Image (cartoon, rainbow, N blue to C red):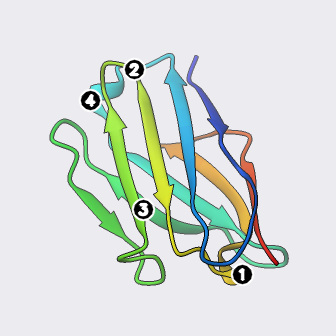
Amino acid sequence: QVRLVESGGGLVQPGGSLRLSCAASGFTFINYAMNWYRQAPGKERRLVATISRGDGRPNYADSVKGRFTISRDNAKNTVYLQMSSLKPEDTAVYYCNQLGNWGQGTQVTVSS
């Protein structure tokens, strides 16, 4: 049974940083690409970043390029999202994703 558990969200001021973590279990982690999505109130869930299986090549939505960094630790079965220079428009629930599986989400609020 696939399980994805996000952590690390919270309230941060504009310009601040947060690091999200997603602990994965129930599948062979190194064999799968992993994704971070986000969903702002009243909006569709959108892809933020993806990291390939194995060598971990990243790809980012244009809205977060240069500010967010996705990484993975295959020994710990964990994927991370380092978020810097946060803006109010980054406020959303952030979800970890593997194929059709989702975590419960973690709230990120950027506000002064």
Q: Amino acid at mark 1?
A: Pro
Q: Which mark is residue 49?
A: 3
Q: Is residue 100 visible?
A: no
Residue that carries the numbered disc 4 in the rendered image? 31
Considering the image in quadrants, where does the N terminus appear? Answer: top right
Look at the numbered discs 3 and 2 and tell me whether their residues touch, using CB distance below 8 Å. Answer: no
State which mark lies toward you, 2 or 1.
1
Residue that carries the numbered disc 1 in the rendered image? 88
Q: Amino acid at mark 4?
A: Asn
Provide residue 49's location: percent of width, then percent of height.
42, 62
Sort mark 2 into few (<14), some (14-19) or many (20+) by Cα contacts within 10 Å: few
Location of residue 77 with respect to 56 vertically, above or below: above
Relative to 12, 34 lies left or right: left
Considering the image in quadrants, where does the C terminus appear? Answer: bottom right
Sort mark 3 into few (<14), some (14-19) or many (20+) by Cα contacts within 10 Å: many
Residue found at x 43% / y 73%:
67
**SS assignment at label 2:** loop
Look at the numbered discs 4 and 2 and tell me whether their residues touch, using CB distance below 8 Å. Answer: no
Q: Amino acid at mark 2?
A: Lys
Relative to 31, 67 lies left or right: right
Location of residue 94 with respect to 59 vertically, above or below: above
Ranked by sequence position, the earlier of labels 4 and 2 is 4
Which of the 4 image quadrants contains residue 3?
top right
Ranked by sequence position, the earlier of labels 3 and 2 is 3
Residue that carries the numbered disc 2 in the rendered image? 76
Disc 2 to disc 1, C-alpha distance = 31 Å
Disc 1 to disc 3, C-alpha distance = 18 Å
**SS assignment at label 4:** helix
Location of residue 17 with respect to 34 vertically, above or below: below
